[in-house]
Amino acid sequence: MRILLTLILIITVTVAVADKAANFSLQDTQGNKVKLGDVLASKGCVLIDFWELSCFSCKQALPKYQKIYDKYKNQGLEILAISVDSVRTVNNVAPYAAGSGLTFPILLDTNNDVFRNYHVEVMPTSFLVDCTGEIRFTHSGFKPGDEQEIEEKIVEILKDYAGQKQ
């Protein structure tokens, strides 16, 4: 019985830890270091989106995320779009982002360290993280219309954030 209780406790602690977003520090396309912990300290909700230039679904999702960002950035939303393009193609990321009108930070994970740490298996994959660092929602893949569910989840998190600030 004692062993069973110990196992349950270990599993519970492991699950609780797994729900926290792993901190990271990456360079953006301007060469600035961006740390997730710093962003979480000042924002109510962070959408972390893993993408790459060769991914058609990723290129469909990013403009939709830009519209959501424009709508909620003043309410505490930040988007960190993490490109996992290799050193061979990474020089095309900033021109693509600028040409697509993306104004949220585009981060570069050319070694795929953060990508692996988040156990991403499908491109694109997005994580919604609240101000405490808890991953509240994960979305894999993208098809038009998916942005509605993601926006609904963002609104929920931002409502919680607004309630905490009062």
Image: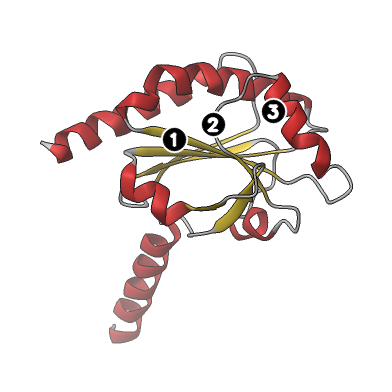
Q: Residue at x 69, y 19 (%)?
A: 100
Which numbered tag is attached to residue 97? Answer: 3
SS label for mark 3: helix
Q: Disc 1 versus disc 3: distance between alpha carbons?
A: 16 Å
Q: How is the image coloured?
A: secondary structure
Looking at numbered disc 2 in the image, what kind of residue is underneath it? Answer: Phe
Q: Residue at x 29, y 31 (%)?
A: 158
**Neighbour class for label 3 at 10 Å: few (<14), some, many (≥20)?**
many
Earlier sequence position, callout 1 versus callout 3: 1
Nearest the viewer among 115 and 142 is: 115
**Neighbour class for label 2 at 10 Å: few (<14), some, many (≥20)?**
some
Badge 1 is on which residue? 78
Looking at numbered disc 3 in the image, what kind of residue is underneath it? Answer: Ala
Image x and y of residue 36, in percent: 46, 52
Which quadrant of the view contains residue 16? bottom left
Looking at numbered disc 1 in the image, what kind of residue is underneath it? Answer: Glu
SS label for mark 2: loop
Image x and y of residue 143, in percent: 65, 19
Q: Is residue 118 visible?
A: no
Using residue 96 as the reference point, say whether residue 104 is left or right of it. left
Which quadrant of the view contains residue 106? top right
**Which quadrant holds the C terminus?**
top left
Q: Disc 2 versus disc 1: distance between alpha carbons?
A: 7 Å
Q: Are marks 2 and 1 in contact (CB under 8 Å)?
A: yes
Relative to 123, say whether 69 is above or below. Answer: above
Which numbered tag is attached to residue 104? Answer: 2
Using residue 17 as the reference point, say whether residue 95 is left or right of it. right
